[in-house]
Amino acid sequence: MSTHAQARPVAGKIIDFPVLALLAIFGIGAVVIAYRFVAGIGAVSNMNDGYAWGIWEPVNVVVFTGIGAGAYSVGLLCYLLGKGEYHPLVRPSVLLGAIAYTLGGSSIVVALGRYWNMYWLALPSMWNVSSVLLEVAVCVCLYVCVLWIEVLPAVLERAAASRSPGWAARGRRWGARLALAMPYIIALAMLLPTMHQSSLGGLLLIAGTKVHALWHTPLLPLLALVSCLSMGFGAVVVLVTLMNRTWRAALEPRLLRALCLANGGFLLLYVGLRLGDLALAGKLHLLARADWHAGLFAVELAFFVLPALMFFSSRVRSSRPALLLGAMMAVAAGALWRLDAFITCFDPGAGYTYFPSYGEIAVTVGMAALGGAVFAIVSRLVPVVELAEPASHAVHGAGEREALARG
């Protein structure tokens, strides 16, 4: 993103045809969700006692939060390593993270059997402090709040630029107050995902032999953390590239190349950890078996190795389409590992089988569509995306937004 760029609301209608299409797709999932709360989880899902989580947890929670880890990845670069040149990527990645984590948490509510007992989470006296899942739940809830607080500076900046004196004064006053608290908010934004992303891997430690030997390892927490960073970097590159193509967002090729180069290191780190662990545990012979688990492992590992090799190639780094392809593969790699570990290679035994129902698929696709729609709407209301075009171009059609700001 260029130094001449400036974060502004994206031009155009707040709700255009693509957004309407995405909302319509979500509408189908919303009908299924409503029916679930009327008729029960069994009416829309194929989950059973053996597969107590269907695709909603591995995809809507574990994969969505991996994609949302772009906020975590960019935050580590900007605030922990002091790489201020990546700051233009912070607002889009934080918004993406806030939406992804919110949808993940919402999916848990849909999947819970006794959802009416959710209030127990707010009562420490009801906590099972030995539960990894409790730590994940508390950290994710807190992190959702932290992410939306990190979105607030853009909202307050928009309010401060309003033609309404009242809104402008509120925006400036609360913007200044929030700026004083941001160092503490950012510290939480670095701590919480480190805890719950690693704990997502820790959830599978107690599964023992129910998880195939190629995926069950004491390194599960570390693998979950490393893969979420590679997914996050990949998601940010994909997001910025798409924003550049659709909204003409400012794009700094040097930053994308650097992100991809760093991502190549995380991808190879994952591969080294995975193969090294198998060697030390004496499990390499499992790769020689002619079964579908070995095949899945090979495909999964290829998705980690290929983008890493691409990112270390100077020719690839000079090609935007190639960088986009590599970034998409990096996201897919982390998603594949999560799906394999949590469901594809999970075997509860006792003859249990599972395949997602149409209702589960509708909810998953609908949630993803809602995420895209919300990102577009928020980006048109508040300054999240840096645009290189003149301000007069960027605020075309902003009358609706000004009316909204004036209340």
Image: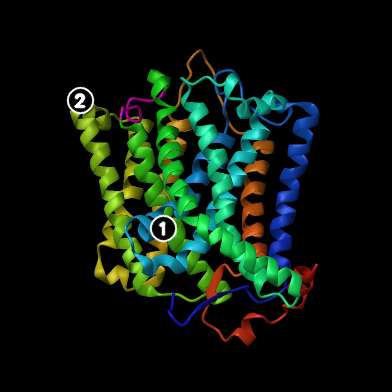
Asked whether 214 falls inside the magenta stretch, the response is yes
Q: Secondary structure at mark 2?
A: loop
Q: Which quarter of the rendered picture does the N terminus lie within?
A: bottom left
- Three-letter amino acid code at the position of disc 1: Val
In the rendered image, which residue does mark 2 sit on? 282
Instruction: Write the start and end of the magenta stretch as one range.
Output: 211-218
Q: Is 53 displayed left or right of 229 in the figure?
A: right
Q: Position of residue 255 (x, y in %)?
A: 36, 69
Front residue (pair 131, 145): 145
In x, y percent, where is residue 310?
29, 61
Q: Does 193 sit left or right of 111 as displayed? A: left
Q: CA distance from mark 2 to mark 1?
A: 37 Å
The vertical placement of 347 against 249, above or below, is: above
Secondary structure under the numbered disc 1 in the rendered image: helix
- Residue labelled with disc 1: 74
Query: Is any atom of residue 382 visible in this view?
Result: no
The image's mark for residue 174 is none
- What type of secondary structure mainly makes up the magenta span? loop
Q: Report the residue at 44% width, 27% height from top.
A: 203
Compare residues 82 and 239 and report the one nearer the observer: 82
